[in-house]
Image: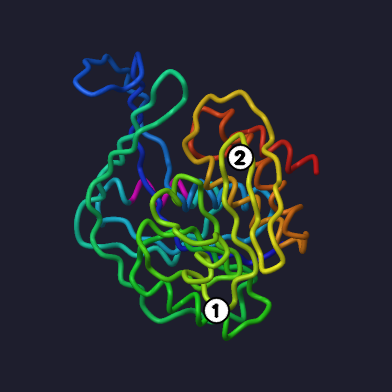
């Protein structure tokens, strides 16, 4: 069991299920799939809770009824939300437009800028995961690296070129398109700094490649029937974090990520489903 701090969004997702794939200028019918808890904080955090880790979330929601609903739901499911900031204003719903093939388009409102305050005491944390555009995330990450050599820092590649000091940097192949004009390892080092040990690039059912100073290695995906791809990347990161907290070699941790992602895409939700919970209970 590890103490894991997640810096990630937590959302109220509204699901719109279309009758056919999206195309420009088209007309579509939809079914309202209702509201569900989502965002990287929930999608990554809940699997880790089910794996018996202590998971605390750093995020922000509005001081309104939707914000109350998000925090009540997340807390009931086992996430420690005491570090979630409440801003003055409304928490807007995130729209997830789902097509019959399981693909999704995300439409989200502009968020207020999230300014992190003083970094926590890193001695109490075994892992710190970053999947947020919050200002100050890089300072927290570097402080964690410098303060506690036993705290594993894992980060998702940002949508822009901001620094992400970490031991393990994760990106999808689509995140890399048009951004990497050098060798992947050198690119990752320019983002993550000297502490970087591994750069993981995922590519859906083609698996993932781990780059390091020693070279690269491919880890295959775990095949599954795709129902809903929302949250697959978050579940993959959760599996990797779990593996690293279990002191697995990086390639075994990546297999855990692939396995957890396979459960995610086979579940009609963004948060991990009952199949992952049953797997972890039986392990």
Q: Quadrant of the N terminus?
A: bottom right
> In the visual, does 93 lie left or right of 259?
left
Which residues lie in the magenta part? Answer: 68-74
In space, the residues marked 1 and 2 are separated at their CA atoms by 27 Å
Type of secondary structure dominating the magenta stretch: helix
Residue 7 — which label?
none
- Image quadrant where residue 207 sits: top right
Q: Residues within 10 Å of mark 1 (few under 14, many from 20)?
A: many
Dividing the image into 4 quarters, which one contains the C terminus? top right
- Disc 2 designates what residue? 261
In percent of width and height, residue 45 lies at 55, 52
Element type at mark 2? helix
Locate residue 42, reporting x and y percent.
49, 48
Asked whether 31 falls inside the magenta stretch, the response is: no
Q: Residue furthest right?
A: 283
Residue behind mark 1: 144
Lower sequence index among marks 1 and 2: 1
What residue occupies the far front of the structure in this picture?
A: 182
Residue 71 shown in magenta:
yes
Q: Residue at x 61, y 81 (%)?
A: 123
Q: Residue at x 25, y 62 (%)?
A: 87
**In this rendering, position of residue 81 left or right of residue 113:** right
Residue 44 is left or right of residue 108, and the answer is right
The picture quadrant where one finds residue 248 is: bottom right
**Is residue 241 depicted above or below 128 in this figure?**
above
Q: Which quadrant would residue 253 be assigned to in this image?
A: bottom right
């Amino acid at each position: 069991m590890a103490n894991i701090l997640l810096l990630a969004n937590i959302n109220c997702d509204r699901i719109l299920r279309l009758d056919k794939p999206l195309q420009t200028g088209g007309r579509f019918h939809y079914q309202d799939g209702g509201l569900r808890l989502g965002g990287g904080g929930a999608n990554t955090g809940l699997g880790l809770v089910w794996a018996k880790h202590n998971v605390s979330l750093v995020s922000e929601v509005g001081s309104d009824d939707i914000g109350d609903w998000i925090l009540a739901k997340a807390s009931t499911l086992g996430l420690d939300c005491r570090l979630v900031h409440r801003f003055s204003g409304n928490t807007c719903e995130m729209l997830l437009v789902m097509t019959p093939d399981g693909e999704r388009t995300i439409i989200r409102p502009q968020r207020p800028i999230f300014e992190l305050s003083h970094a926590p005491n890193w001695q109490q944390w075994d892992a710190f995961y970053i999947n947020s555009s919050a200002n100050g995330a890089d300072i927290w990450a570097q402080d964690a690296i410098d303060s506690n050599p036993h705290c594993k820092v894992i980060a998702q590649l940002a949508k822009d070129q901001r620094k992400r000091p970490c031991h393990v940097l994760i990106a999808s192949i689509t995140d890399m398109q048009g951004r990497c004009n050098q060798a992947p390892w050198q690119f990752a080092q320019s983002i993550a700094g000297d502490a970087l040990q591994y750069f993981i690039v995922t590519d859906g059912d083609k698996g993932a490649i781990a780059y390091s100073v020693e070279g690269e290695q491919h880890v295959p995906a775990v095949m599954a029937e795709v129902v809903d791809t929302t949250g697959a990347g978050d579940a993959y990161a959760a599996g990797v974090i779990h593996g690293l907290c279990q002191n697995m070699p990086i390639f075994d941790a990546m297999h855990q990520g692939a396995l957890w992602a396979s459960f995610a895409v086979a579940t009609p939700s963004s948060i991990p489903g009952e199949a992952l919970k049953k797997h972890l209970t039986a392990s």
